[in-house]
Amino acid sequence: MRTAALPLQPDARLTPSAIGHAATLALYDELSLSPKPGLVTLIDCGSHDDMDAHTFMRSLFSLRRYFVQIAEAGADGADFAVLERHGIAAEARMLAATRGINTHRGAIFMLGLLCASAGAALREQHGPLHPAALRDALRRHWGDALARRSQRPSVLPGGIAARRLGLRSASQEAALAFPVLFETALPALGDALARGLTPRQARLETLFRIIAVLDDSNLAHRGGLAGLRAAQRAAQGFLDRGGIARAGGLSHAQAITDDFVRQRLSPGGAADTLAAACWIQRVCAAP
């Protein structure tokens, strides 16, 4: 699969099928990027012993129909219970494809909600989809349900770690309509592209900006609060020194990547957020 360029002015005739296809491409955008601190790429396993690029590709292909279905559900005005059923079924297909390995559980939740929101927004408006309309649709249609869901005790390792350490969990991030995605990641990606960075450079820079601010429950689960804060400081230090565009920027990114692997840290929440930002760039007109 080849990585397509990021369109800044998508076709106004966006459909649920196109929304879902863009989600699959966005997950590949994230997978194909390197060097990524602790994350699986096409050429290495990062901090993981149980998965590689082949695992991710099997997972990705198992989810293609899900993203279309949940966009259709959003366009049909489905309530949150329907979206949850789609997500649970998608997770079962993912686990069957990966032989029980969790590759995309966070993306099923995050990108699934966003695809549903895109479907709902398209039903309510004419013309190109904009990020603000996407976020507004998420809040209006499922904000209350997400707020209630965020109060439920999590049985997943990341959610348990977030609750124990007093961090903002993935469920709470969703209940707030993904502030790190819309207020940090998406502006950073757009700014990097506007500055003339290549798509690869822009995505790498955006990934570090996300790591620097996100309460990533995957990092908290693997490294505790100390591991999370160390990862955030490393990412912010990379940005403070000029990021990916400066001389030596790529080598610095690789050094941080190597250090994450040594510490067995993996910012899976940041990876999901980056994929979501790439997806928005594919389906939304410039804000």
Image: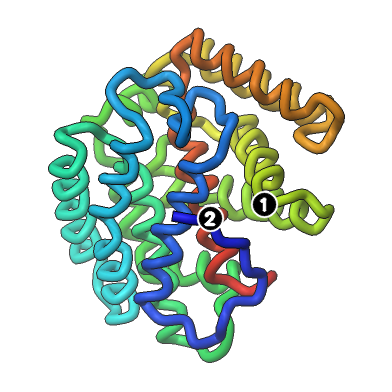
Q: Can residue 167 be seen in this view?
A: no
How far apart marks 2 and 1 lie (CA) works out to 10 Å
Residue placed farthest to the bottom in the image? 126
Residue 101 lies, with reference to residue 74, above or below; the image says above
Secondary structure of the residue carrying numbered label 1: helix
Image spot of residue 262 (x, y percent): 50, 8
Q: Mark 2 points at which residue?
A: 3
Q: In which quarter of the image is the C terminus?
A: bottom right
Q: Which amino acid does label 1 sit on?
A: Pro
Q: Which amino acid does label 2 sit on?
A: Thr
Q: Is residue 90 left or right of residue 192?
A: left
Which residue shows up at 86% across the image and 28% down it?
247
Image spot of residue 16 (x, y percent): 36, 77
Residue 119, quarter of the rendered image: bottom left
Q: In this view, does 14 lie to the left or right of 96?
A: right
Which residue shows up at 49% across the image and 23% down it?
38
Q: How is the image coloured?
A: rainbow
Image spot of residue 206 (x, y percent): 65, 42
Q: Is residue 160 left or right of residue 256?
A: left
Would you call the spot at circle 2 few (<14 residues within 10 Å), some (14-19), or many (20 or more)? some
Q: Name the residue under label 1.
A: 199
Nearest to the observer: residue 264 or residue 49: 49
Q: Quadrant of the N terminus?
A: bottom left
Pointers 2 and 1 in contact (C-beta within 8 Å): yes
